[in-house]
Structures are given as C-alpha cells and as structure tokens.
Image (tube, helix red, strand yellow):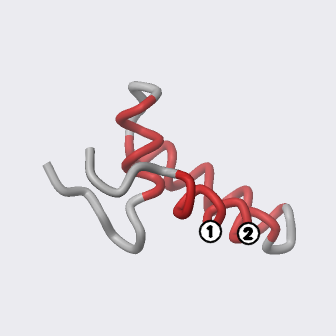
Amino acid sequence: MNDKVLLGVCSWLARRFDLDIRGVRIAFIIGTLLSFGTAILAYLILALVKPKYE
C-alpha cells in the first residue's frame, strides 16, 4: 500500500503506531497552524529519520 503524498511521513507514522492516516494528516495540519510552522521542521526531521523502504 502506497499512501505517500509528499515524503510519506504521515503514512509511516500511521502504520507504525496503528493510527488512521487521515487523523495523522489532520493532526499535522493543525499542529502546523498552531505552532507557526514548527511542525514542518519536525516533518522534515522525521523524513530523514524514517526508514527509506519498509
């Protein structure tokens, strides 16, 4: 299953913690808006840390 939209971080987190992909994406959007973009930095760091192929 390929749920990648940008770098696949949200789909990776959803699979890793057995969460709904839509919930993870909505949480990321809300987190980005409330943190004035700091969540984007966390997203990029997670993109570097997550395994390339799973």
* Quadrant housing residue 2: bottom left
Residue denoted by label 1: 44
Q: Pointers 1 and 2 in contact (CB under 8 A)?
A: yes
Mark 1, secondary structure of its residue: helix
> What's the mark number on residue 52?
none
Callout 2, which amino acid? Leu
Front-most of residues 51 and 22: 51
For residue 26, side relative to residue 34 (left or right): left
Q: Which residue is at 86% across, 72% downward?
A: 36
Callout 1, which amino acid? Leu
Q: Give x and y (percent) for residue 37.
A: 79, 73
What crowding class fits label 2: few (fewer than 14 Cα within 10 Å), some (14-19), or many (20 or more)? few
Q: Which residue is at 40% across, 74% downward?
A: 6
Q: Which residue is at 55% across, 63% downward?
A: 48
What crowding class fits label 1: few (fewer than 14 Cα within 10 Å), some (14-19), or many (20 or more)? few
Mark 2, secondary structure of its residue: helix
Q: Give x and y (percent) for residue 28.
A: 62, 56
For residue 35, side relative to residue 39 (left or right): right
* Quadrant housing residue 43: bottom right
Residue denoted by label 2: 41
Q: Give x and y (percent) for residue 38.
A: 81, 67
